[in-house]
């Protein structure tokens, strides 16, 4: 019996990473270079991956909705992997790039800044974790549920006190409730209501344009640009992350901010100016693409490799016809990487890492097979009825983050050999 294939165009990814001189890797974190887990405090990252990342200095940046800092930030994971904060700083092991959806910048030495963010906005965000905790406690009190040690631990795990993107991460509660879909759905609704209430309160403090809500995974956006919650169904936790985000903190804007920094590093001049940030970027795909086409010199445009693991779609029947709800926190930034490649005639790569093997039960596994000698996707990460999805996945890694890290690390070694 012929073994099932584990990847589409893994060799192409390896060659691109190893041999492309003008390269820009824009990579998500959770599910891509480390496994998805219910409790963010238990995440682990391979020191070999961190070591390999140095081979891509100036060509590799992360782009995540999580954060670098804080008790649940990626920096703590890095420090545990290399033997502590002192070692991480001296070895420059921290991952450079943008967090909190594009508004938290970090250098390799761990120095963090928040371009374009005001003190008033940070002060408002500081109160959000308290409100999330209070809402969860009131929810269970209204149900007549005592908050014992187990429930207290689950609530504490659910509250991510991020500086720039405070989050309710409901994975631990979903597990605590033994996947009780009905009760968990009520918690989803309570979190959505809280987030909307916070937006109203921010507007009353003259911060109406400062924040928005990011749901992950989601069902895309409605006609007002507001993300849609993916409600839980049996066996699928749906939306687990309810993130109160700074306006402009969208990954696709982060792509443009990273591209602006890449140009400055290579040419000495930032096409959009040194003060440009995700917060000052246009808000739509078309406007972002137009800005790049108008302001960036094609002679210096890199080959961009976008790497993510969260791309969803669900087909619904509305008024007798199918409507595709396309979402996922990586979809829009990957689609912009794809569009920039098409506009500048570059062989940009959209890389999809299948993270369905992790602890979270809201990811659909891809299924690969053969058509003759060619490897094809028999089941996509989205709805198989969504046959005209504009996002094309150039590289699909069914082996998940271990497979991606293996390719990334092998290509790093080859890249160093070529440069010598």
Image (cartoon, rainbow, N blue to C red):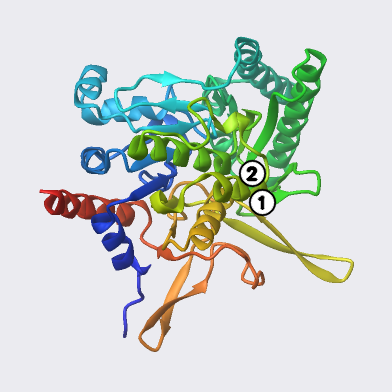
Residue 370 vs 339, above or below: the answer is below
Residue 84 vs 227, above or below: the answer is above
Answer with mark 2 or mark 1, whichever residue precedes in sequence. Answer: 2
Instruction: Residue 13 in the image: state x and y as whole percent.
Output: 33, 61
* Any part of residue 362 in sight: no
Q: In this figure, which residue is indicated by the disc labeled 1?
A: 286
Quadrant of the rendered structure where residue 259 is?
Answer: top left
- Structural crowding at the residue carrying mark 2, measured as other residues with C-alpha within 10 Å and reported as few (<14), some (14–19) or many (≥20): many
Under circle 2, the secondary element is: loop
Q: Quadrant of the N terminus?
A: bottom left
- Point 65% across, 10% down: residue: 120
* Any part of residue 349 in sight: yes
- Point 57% across, 52% down: residue: 331
- Structural crowding at the residue carrying mark 1, measured as other residues with C-alpha within 10 Å and reported as few (<14), some (14–19) or many (≥20): few
Instruction: Residue 389 in the image: state x and y as whole percent.
Output: 63, 66
**Which one is nearer the viewer's eye here, 265 or 208?**
265
The numbered dot on residue 139 is none
Q: In this figure, which residue is indicated by the disc labeled 2?
A: 239
Quadrant of the rendered structure where residue 376 is?
Answer: bottom left
Quadrant of the rendered structure where residue 2 is?
Answer: bottom left
Instruction: Residue 219 in the image: state x and y as whole percent.
Output: 69, 51
- Point 56% across, 35% down: residue: 176
Residue 89 vs 305, above or below: the answer is above
**Which one is nearer the viewer's eye here, 70 or 107?**
107
Residue 341 vs 137, above or below: the answer is below
Under circle 1, the secondary element is: helix
Foreground disc of the pair 2, 1: 1
Q: Relative to 69, is 218 on the left or the right?
A: right
- Point 49% across, 64% down: residue: 393
The span from disc 2 to disc 1 (Cα, nearest Å) is 27 Å
């Amino acid at each position: 019996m012929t073994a099932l294939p584990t990847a589409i165009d893994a060799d192409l990814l390896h060659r691109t990473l190893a041999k492309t001189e003008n390269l820009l890797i824009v990579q998500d974190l959770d599910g891509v270079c480390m496994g998805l887990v219910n409790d963010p405090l238990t995440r682990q990252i391979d020191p070999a991956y961190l070591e390999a990342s140095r081979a891509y200095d100036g060509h590799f940046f992360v782009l995540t909705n999580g954060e670098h800092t804080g008790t649940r930030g990626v920096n703590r994971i890095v420090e545990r992997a290399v033997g502590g904060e002192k070692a991480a700083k001296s070895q420059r092991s921290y991952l450079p790039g943008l967090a909190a959806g594009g508004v938290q910048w970090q250098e390799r030495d761990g120095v963090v800044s928040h371009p374009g963010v005001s003190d008033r906005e940070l002060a408002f965000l500081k109160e959000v974790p308290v409100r999330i905790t209070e809402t969860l406690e009131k929810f269970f009190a209204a149900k007549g549920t005592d908050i014992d040690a187990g429930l207290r631990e689950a609530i504490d795990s659910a509250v991510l006190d991020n500086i720039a993107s405070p989050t309710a991460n409901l994975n631990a509660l979903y597990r605590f409730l033994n996947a009780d879909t009905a009760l968990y759905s009520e918690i989803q609704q309570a979190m959505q209501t809280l987030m909307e209430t916070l937006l109203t309160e921010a507007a009353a403090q003259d911060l109406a344009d400062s924040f928005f809500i990011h749901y992950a995974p989601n069902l895309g956006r409605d006609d007002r640009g507001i993300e849609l919650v993916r409600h839980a169904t049996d066996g699928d936790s749906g939306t687990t992350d309810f993130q109160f985000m700074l306006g402009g903190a969208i990954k696709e804007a982060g792509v443009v901010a990273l591209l602006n920094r890449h140009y400055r590093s290579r040419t000495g001049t930032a096409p959009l100016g040194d003060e440009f940030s995700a917060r000052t970027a246009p808000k739509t795909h078309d406007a972002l693409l137009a800005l790049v086409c108008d302001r960036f010199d094609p002679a210096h445009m890199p080959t961009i490799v976008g790497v993510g693991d969260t791309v969803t779609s669900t087909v619904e029947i509305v008024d007798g016809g199918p409507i595709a709800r396309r979402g996922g926190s990586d979809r829009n930034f990957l689609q912009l990487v794809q569009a920039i490649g098409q506009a500048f005639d570059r062989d940009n790569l959209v890389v999809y890492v299948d993270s369905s093997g992790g602890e979270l039960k809201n990811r659909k596994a891809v299924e690969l097979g053969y058509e003759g000698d060619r490897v094809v996707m028999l089941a996509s990460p989205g709805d198989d009825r969504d046959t005209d999805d504009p996002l094309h996945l150039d590289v699909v890694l069914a082996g998940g983050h271990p497979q991606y890290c293996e390719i990334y690390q092998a290509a790093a070694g080859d890249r160093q050999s070529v440069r010598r």
